[in-house]
Amino acid sequence: MGASGWEYYVPYQEDLGAALDALRQKVFEAQDYYWDPWDEDNADEARVRPSTLDQLWEDEQVQEEGTHSILDMHRMLRRGEDPDFGTVEPVQPVEAYRMAGTDRLTRAHVQAIEPLAGRRWFGRCAVLHDSHGCPEEIYFWGFSGD
């Protein structure tokens, strides 16, 4: 299938990790992720979607192929921590300035910062501001899945 790009906008909150957790729960509950309903070992039997995130990640096919969504990201990186599989890294002010010419990003800057998420199985997030420079929303984006 190959990797899929994904993006989400959520209302701003100071705790980016909590925002990530809430987004993951919302996407899971909405079933807005890739799920192959067919059992490869038994073509006559459909697979039932899991009822919890833990059950989702117990599924061997999901472990191998991912969900092609924010569900493939498991935690927010702390400042100075190295990016790793399934992590989301916030855009730093120096990156924002280099890519968009400002450290007060808005939706108008999204296209300029999108190249910052060029690696698979790794996400980024950026705080986006309103016209008065106040934090308004968080933009999550990345690529995952096989």
Image (cartoon, rainbow, N blue to C red):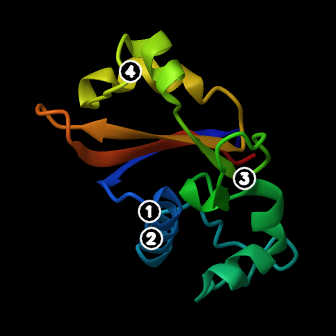
| Residue 15 figure quarter | bottom left
Task: Tell me the quadrant of the picture where the N terminus can be found.
Answer: top right
Amino acid type of the residue tagged 3 in the rendering: Gly
**Mark in the foreground, 3 or 1:** 1
Residue lying at 65% horizontally and 66% vertically, measured from the top left: 36
Disc 3 from disc 4: Cα separation:
23 Å
Amino acid type of the residue tagged 1 in the rendering: Ala
Which residue is the site of mark 2? 22
Crowd band around label 4 with a 10 angstrom C-alpha radius: few (<14), some (14–19), many (20+): few
Q: Label 4 near label 1: C-beta < 8 Å?
A: no
Residue lying at 75% horizontally and 44% vertically, measured from the top left: 81
Mark 2 vs 3, N-terminal side: 2
Where is residue 38 drawn, in percent x and y?
A: 70, 72
Mark 1 vs 4, N-terminal side: 1
Crowd band around label 1 with a 10 angstrom C-alpha radius: few (<14), some (14–19), many (20+): some
Which residue is the site of mark 1? 19
Mark 3 vs 1, N-terminal side: 1
Q: Label 4 near label 2: C-beta < 8 Å?
A: no
Crowd band around label 2 with a 10 angstrom C-alpha radius: few (<14), some (14–19), many (20+): few
Dot 1 falls on a residue whose secondary structure is: helix
Disc 2 from disc 4: Cα separation:
25 Å
Q: Is residue 88 above or below residue 74?
A: above
Q: Locate residue 128 relative to residue 15 in the image: left or right.
A: left
Which residue is the site of mark 3? 86
Q: Is residue 5 visible?
A: no
Which residue is the site of mark 4? 111
Disc 3 from disc 1: Cα separation:
16 Å
Q: Locate residue 107 relative to residue 100 in the image: left or right.
A: left
Mark 3 vs 4, N-terminal side: 3
